Amino acid sequence: MGNYSTLVMIALMVLAFYLLILRPQKKRQQAIQKTMAELTPGTRVLLGSGLFGTIVSLGDRQAVLEIAPGVELTVLKQAIVRTVTEADEDAVVEEYDELDDEAVTEPEPVAPRNDTNSLLPTDPDAANGADRSSPSAGADPKRLS
């Protein structure tokens, strides 16, 4: 009886492995193959890196994408995750330029600062005229020569 229950447990584990891992992976692979087969020039796509582009041309392993007007990028077809939907992209918002409606005024001139502290040395030895070429106290004179 114990040998029979072991075989049933093994069969259940194999079935669970198939249902939880192999079947979803096979479906994902089929979806990717379907997406790759549907790619045509002019299709807007999303790369795995998050970059959007429009397909210009397709090869066996590579695709040329236009990521900005006049800017083309060659990528592996495997980098294409999916085609872009309207929900993926933000709506183009026209920026309102407030300066067009208002008169431009010149900024008021700022008086130069009279900062005399910046002219004074910050090192007290430099203020006393100490010679920096002589060894400082505690320095080994043999190493300096």
Image (tube, helix red, strand yellow):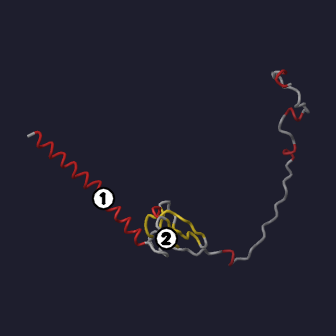
Numbered label attached to residue 131: none
Q: Label 1: which residue?
A: 24
Quadrant for residue 112, please give it.
Answer: bottom right
| Nearer to me, 10 or 67 | 10
SS class of the residue under badge 1? helix
Q: Earlier in the sequence, mark 1 or mark 2?
A: 1
Q: Amino acid at mark 2?
A: Leu
In this view, the residue farthest toward the left is 1
Return the residue nearer the eye: 46 or 123: 46
Looking at the image, is 138 positioned above or below residue 112? above
Residue at 85% of width from left, 33% of height from top?
124
* Amino acid type of the residue that numbered disc 1 sits on in the rendered structure: Pro
Which residue is found at the position 31% from the left and 60% from the top?
26
Q: Which residue is mark 2?
A: 58
Mark 2 crowd level (few <14, some 14–19, many ≥20, 10 Å Cα): some
Looking at the figure, which quarter contains the N terminus?
top left
Circles 1 and 2 in contact, beta carbons < 8 Å: no
Crowding at dot 1, Cα within 10 Å, few <14 / some 14-19 / many 20+, comes out as: few
Give coordinates of residue 49: x percent, y percent: 50, 60
Q: Residue furthest front?
A: 60
In the image, residue 117 lies at what x, y percent?
Answer: 85, 44
Q: Depth check: 130 or 57 in front? A: 57
